Amino acid sequence: MPLIFYSVAALVAYLLGSIPFGYLLVRFFRKEDIRQKGSGNIGATNVMRSGSKGLGAVTFLLDVLKGFFAVWLCGVAAARSGLGPDVRANATAIAALFVVLGHIYTVWLGFKGGKGVATAFGVFLALAPWAALAGLGVFVVVFAVSRYVSLGSILSALAFPVLALLMPHAPRTSWATAVLFIIPLIVVLRHHENIARLMKGTEYRFRKTGMGKPGTTAA
């Protein structure tokens, strides 16, 4: 029974994660392909960079919600199935991992998707809400100082597993603990191009009134 439940949880979470909200919103409202804009990423940052802050905000919200919902739904289904706490913890960890993988490697767009930041945040809210909010605080501070979305995303991702283990809602099983580190690692690795640009000083930086040119500072 646990193996079947784990498999179903992985499949459902992956399909939820694969819904490319950024692509769909830009296609529907602007008749454009977000993959042909900016970085080519389907995530909220690139949607905003393409010139639509409203669609970017909605994309972020929906990507967060699909991450949260996948973990929540798995937890509810496991509880109603009468599975034990360790099996439930393992199942939600699997759902958390696969919803992020679904966003990054969406089956609907040739297995090319986003970087997983917003979806990972939704997952973290479901798994360890206080740690997720603390991680969001790290992002806000880093972004406010540097104006780099990528740097804030990377540092908040790195901070999350430590915060999750220090705060309430620490995972019960080795699987759950591993996922707390695997997901941030995936997010960081997905930012390898941003890391290279940060080191060269050519990374995109948001101005207070919009997107700055590579290497420019906030006005």
Image: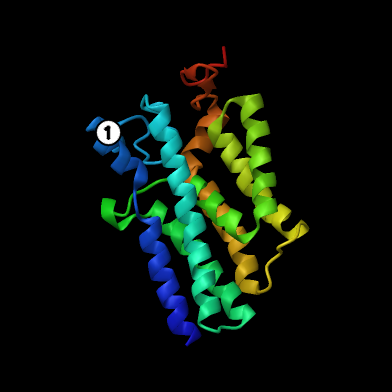
The residue lying at 46 percent from left, 41 percent from top is: 60
- Give the residue drawn at x 58%, y 64%: 179
Residue 205 position in % (x across, y down): 52, 24
Asked whether 4 or 201 is in front, the reply is: 4
Q: Could you tell me which secondary element the residue under label 1 belongs to?
A: helix
Judging depth in this view, the residue of 149 and 29 nearest the camera is: 29
Left or right for 124, reference 165: left
- The x, y position of residue 116, in whole percent, is 47, 49
| Occupied quadrant, residue 34 | top left
Where in the figure is residue 109, as x and y percent of width and height?
A: 27, 50
Query: In the rendered structure, which amino acid carries the disc numbered 1?
Result: Phe
Q: Is residue 116 left or right of residue 160?
A: left
Q: Quadrant of residue 32?
A: top left
Residue lying farthest to the front in this orientation: 80
Residue farthest along the right direction in this orientation: 166
Q: If the image is split into quadrants, where does the C terminus sit? A: top right
x, y (%) of residue 111?
Answer: 32, 54
Asked whether residue 90 appears in the rendered view, the answer is: yes
Closer-to-camera residue (101/85): 85
Seen in the picture, residue 164 relative to 137 is either above or below; the reply is below
Total count of labels: 1
Q: Residue at x 50, y 84 (%)?
A: 2
Q: List the single residue furthest toward the left.
A: 31
- Report if residue 115 is visible in the image: no
Q: Is residue 184 above or below residue 156?
A: below
Please report the residue visible at 55 percent of the width from the left and 67 percent of the height from the top: 93
Q: Which picture quadrant has residue 35? A: top left
Residue pushed farthest bottom?
Answer: 1
Work out whether 162 lies above or below 55: below
**Location of mark 1 (residue):** 29
